[in-house]
Amino acid sequence: MKFRLGPMLSDILISIYVVVSLYFRFKLESQYPVSPLYSVVMGLCFVTILWVLIKLKVLNPRWFGLFNPKVKKS
């Protein structure tokens, strides 16, 4: 049995993760002289963690309904 989170909880956790990771990056870069390459690598690592969790179906985002294919246009 796989561990899966619901769509709404996944959306909330992804939003919190993005905000915390950006805060961490900005705080680290303001306190220490960090090269731009290191900053890009750190950002890619944070995004890769999210991508892996979505691919493993642990996170099942609905993207807050932004990409809803069931919308009918009149």
Image (spheres, grey):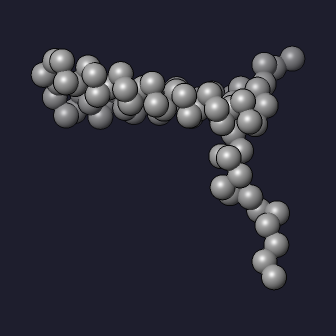
- Residue name at image x 26 percent, y 20 percent: 28
- Residue name at image x 82 percent, y 72 percent: 72
Q: How many marks?
A: 0
60, 73: nearer the viewer: 73
Q: Does residue 59 sit above or below 69 in this rendering?
A: above
- Residue name at image x 72 percent, y 30 percent: 9
Residue 14 in the image: x percent, y percent?
58, 32
Please identify the quarter of the rendering in which residue 67 is found.
bottom right
Please identify the quarter of the rendering in which residue 42 is found.
top left
Residue placed furthest toward the bottom? 74
- Residue name at image x 46 percent, y 31 percent: 19
The quarter of the image holding the N terminus is: top right
Residue placed furthest toward the right? 1
Residue 13 in the image: x percent, y percent?
62, 28
Residue 23 in the image: x percent, y percent?
37, 26
**From the viewer's perspective, is 60 left or right of 33?**
right
The quarter of the image holding the C terminus is: bottom right
Residue 57 at least partly seen: no
**From the viewer's perspective, is 52 left or right of 65?**
left
42, 72: nearer the viewer: 72
Residue 56 in the image: x percent, y percent?
69, 28
**From the viewer's perspective, is 13 left or right of 9?**
left
Residue 44 at least partly seen: yes
